[in-house]
Amino acid sequence: MTRNYADLSPHDFEVLVRDLLQAEFGVRMETFPQGRDGGVDIRLHHGGVDSIVIQCKHSPGRTFAQVRSQLELEARKIGSRFTSRYMLVTSASLTRINKQQIARIFSGVHLREDDILGVDDIENLLTRHPGVETQNFKLWITSSAVLQFLLTSDLHLRSAGLVDRIVKRRKLYVHSEAYAASREMLAAHHVCVISGEPGIGKTTLAETLLVRFMADGWEVNVASVDVSDIERVWRPGEKQVFLYDDFLGQNSLLDSLNKNEDSRLVQIAERIAGDRSKRLIMTTREYILQESRQAYPRLKSSPLLYEDRVVLNLSDYTRVQKAQIFYNHVYFADLGEESLKSIISNKNYLKIIEHPNFNPRMIELVTSNFRDSGVPGCDFHRYALEALNNPRELWESIFQEQLSPVERILLLILATVRQPMEVGDLFKGVSTYESASGTNITPSHGLRLALKKLQGTFVQVTSDARLDDQPNGIHPDNCSAIAELANPSFIDFISSYLSAHPSEISQIAQGAAFFEQVETLVHWDMGGDFDQRLLVSLMDAFFGERSHPKPNPRLAPGQQHVIMDALVRLQDAASCYWVEPADYGPVRVRRPVSELTRHLVMMMMDAKYRRRLLSGRPLSVILEKLTRRVAAESAISVGQEMRLIANLALYPEVCQSVVRVRDAIAERLVESLSSPEEFQTALLPFVSVGVNPSEWSAAAEVELRRRFLDFASAWDSEESGRVNTVADCQESISRLASAIEDFGYFDLEATMLKERLALLEDEVAQDLEFRDEDVSDEDSVIPPNRPPAKRYYGVPFDPVVDLFGSLG
């Protein structure tokens, strides 16, 4: 199995050699500090003397002829200084004759041929000690066998973007203790929540875990919308791992946690905790996780989501861990000799890694953009410090001074869409923007050149995506290209950029080709940021489910009309989002247009400006489409439709028509009622619309409440005989209690819960007895009273000065 040692830095290579020789000799070795005693990188120190000293020469892909002069220089430098056993390890390729020549070159230290190790010897040691490679992720993922599996299997077809990102970024990865701890948590509880600050590496850690699972034969699934993505692809008994990235963040303005989704998320996590064939990895920003304690009490009650988690905090990054992150970016960025001298001189790297604004995402931005900045290499450390002092100025400088107009437009469109875009859609967006602004239309070859220039630093392009949109010329048999922002922090910059450049807002709205672009502007005007983290509170503030202050406006006078005009213009436009089809194949399809969702966005915008933007024909169109949806035989989203109806009822000119639509929905819902959820849904039209009841609705509500009382007692008895596990009992109690609460029958709830708790106690006793007899695999049982597993991790590396000494 061939490995790619070029992805290892000199420091990585020394650590690998140390770990291999420790495993081979069965003793602990230490890395010898750089610059204190030439010719020694690793040593075995025993009884006050060095028993073995090892010199490492990292020269991947080179032959003896190419490294001979370097070895001769090293031999002259050390002379006959060492009398203990001396070893030389290199990543260059060596023959037996090469080793004989090297032994003669190092005759002053009596270097034996069998103490000279080349790349083939390292490969042999890795075969003898596979555990070393397992712990060295950067080396493991570059092995030819692993890459061949990841890049050619059907798993890659479903997760191509994930694999490509990890493979491309493997050289920068810092293998921290959090990786091992996350794997330990997944093995013990099957669920792991990774939380932390923006840009701290949550998604990188999660994706790295997924690649490991993929290589071990697990099927990888990514939840992109809500927990239903997990339920939809669940296959009992098959090894599946699920990633729910930013599970408390949102992808679309109205894709908030729907009614009971918090309970569904807890239920799916607990279900996975008890299933040895499933794993769940979730990420979120730590402050959002804490805020959700107030918004979603049912999430708070689950130790799987709040107590058992890995927390990545900037304040918990050790000085040495920051050094390793900075070192990797600098070493692999090819900044030039002058830049490296700038870092090493006067130990300037210490000022960077100890800076209070140090952030892995900022370090990546600094190193990837320096070559195009025009700053001399000797001033690199000043450039980095200025960027850390004021991160926004770095983005501003790059965006305004280093990019052409068409490159800026490409980035503005990607930032306002917020999701990966098919390149044809992206180019359509640019052309629409340019046409609206009256500038010359950039030809397709110019757009491709601009995208190519942005690729890597700003944009990531996946060229082998399988998309199906045949009416628009996209066939799944042909690979399509997908573009997305490579650096998520650019979205945060655009949010602040628009505040400082308000004229851009009208231009973006007038030049928008997709509804999603204007939707982002609506959310931003509501007070949220571009990555949609304040969505839940904003939605509830405007639709009245919780009491939140309305955010201050960000638009200049008149711009709200421009945005509403764009929403109306694009309400029927095709989506630029791509989703997986219901059968979960590797092909993605364009997300169907949701009239309801788009009309809710429009209503939210109008509500903020005291309902002065929507009137006349646009308002009539919303009502007409609502009426058609209700009259159709297909199912409707009752909760969301009620939100729309409740807001439409506030417009006097359509209020009476809204009452008739409300009654039509209610009449459909009361026809068939066989579960607590169906009764809850049927109740919504009667209690969630702020209009006076009609004669029919008043009588229908009374009848519905009577039917629920009869149903609750009978259903409780039927469920008692149906359920046979603790989890089923808990779910039944939760379902019935939620419905009773909605109907307001609190005395009934207390009586029924008391009866059900007695049944639950019996189930618990039976279940525990069964486990004592049948279960011995600790992986299948979650300890009932396990202590909290919240952990904060830094990564122990060699001292910082020694690390950066290898750059000199």
Image (tube, helix red, strand yellow):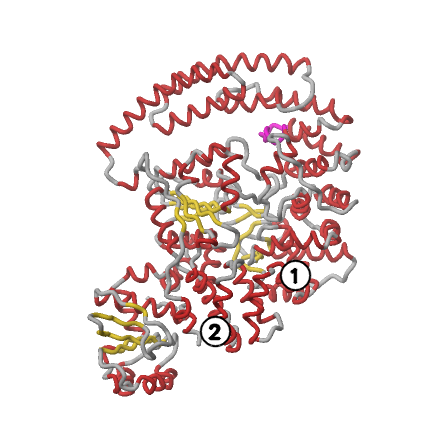
In depth, the one of 661 and 491 nearer the eye is 491
Q: Residue 409 appears at what percent x and percent y? A: 68, 58
Task: Assign the N terminus to one quadrant of the image.
Answer: bottom left
Going 38% across and 51% down the picture, which residue do you hit? 213
- Against 119, residue 407 (above or below) is above
In depth, the one of 502 and 244 nearer the eye is 502
Q: Amino acid at mark 2?
A: Ile
Q: Nearer the viewer, mark 1 or mark 2?
A: 2
Q: Earlier in the sequence, mark 1 or mark 2?
A: 2
Q: Secondary structure at mark 1?
A: helix
- Against 566, residue 738 (above or below) is above
Q: Quadrant of residue 562?
A: top right
Q: Residue 313 appears at what percent x and percent y? A: 46, 51
Q: Residue 226 appears at what percent x and percent y? A: 51, 40
How far apart, in angstroms, are the residues tagged by discs 1 and 2?
28 Å
* Residue 104 is covered by the magenta coloring: no
In depth, the one of 720 and 16 nearer the eye is 16
Which stretch is magenta?
632-642
Q: Label 2 near label 1: C-beta < 8 Å?
A: no
Q: Label 2: how many residues lie within 10 Å, few (<14), some (14-19) or many (20+)?
A: some
Q: Which residue is mark 2?
A: 344
Q: Label 1: how many residues lie within 10 Å, few (<14), some (14-19) or many (20+)?
A: some
Q: Amino acid at mark 1?
A: Glu
> In the image, is 68 to the left or to the right of 746?
left
Q: Which residue is mark 1?
A: 396
Going 48% across and 39% down the picture, which residue do you hit? 227
